[in-house]
Image (cartoon, grey):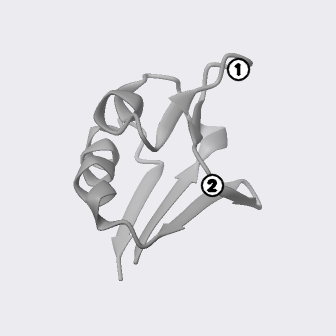
């Protein structure tokens, strides 16, 4: 299972995650911060659990590209 976590309130809106993994991230038109598509929010953290391993590499690249390190990707 691939687990992606986003700490959205610390997002600076650089758009790198969207460029690396557009299937999982998009920018909000309201506040210019990233949105984890299909993520569930809990205490400021958005989490997506998926059995689709095809998203793993793109999401790992998005995590590495993030200048404020608010994206974590786990492969369990």
Give the left or right position of residue 5, taking residue 2 as reference. Answer: right
* Displayed quadrant of residue 28: top right
Seen in the picture, residue 53 relative to 1 is either above or below; the reply is: above
- The residue at 52%/23% (across/down) is 13
Seen in the picture, residue 53 relative to 13 is either above or below; the reply is: below
Quadrant of the drawing holding the C terminus: bottom left
Quadrant of the drawing holding the N terminus: bottom left
- Mark 2 falls on what kind of element? loop
* Displayed quadrant of residue 37: top right
Looking at the picture, tell me which residue is in the foreground, 9 or 38: 38
Q: Earlier in the sequence, mark 2 or mark 1?
A: 1
Looking at the picture, tell me which residue is in the foreground, 19 or 12: 19
Q: Which mark is residue 31?
A: 1
In the image, residue 57 lies at what x, y percent? Answer: 22, 55
Seen in the picture, residue 33 relative to 65 is either above or below; the reply is: above
Q: Which mark is residue 67?
A: none
Give the left or right position of residue 6, taking residue 43 as reference. Answer: left
In the image, residue 54 lies at what x, y percent? Answer: 27, 59
In the image, residue 8 lies at what x, y percent? Answer: 62, 43
Give the left or right position of residue 4, taking residue 44 as reference. Answer: left
- Mark 1 falls on what kind of element? loop
- The residue at 62%/19% (across/down) is 32
What residue is disc 2 on?
39
Q: Residues within 10 Å of mark 1 (few under 14, many from 20)?
A: few
Looking at the picture, tell me which residue is in the foreground, 7 or 3: 3
Q: Residues within 10 Å of mark 2 (few under 14, many from 20)?
A: some
């Amino acid at each position: 299972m691939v687990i992606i976590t986003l700490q959205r309130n610390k997002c600076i809106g650089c758009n790198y995650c969207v460029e690396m993994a557009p299937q999982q991230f998009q920018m909000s038109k309201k506040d210019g911060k990233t949105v984890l598509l299909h993520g569930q929010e809990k205490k400021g953290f958005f989490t997506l659990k998926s059995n689709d391993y095809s998203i793993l590499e793109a999401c790992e690249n998005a995590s590495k590209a993030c200048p404020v390190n608010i994206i974590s990707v786990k492969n369990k």
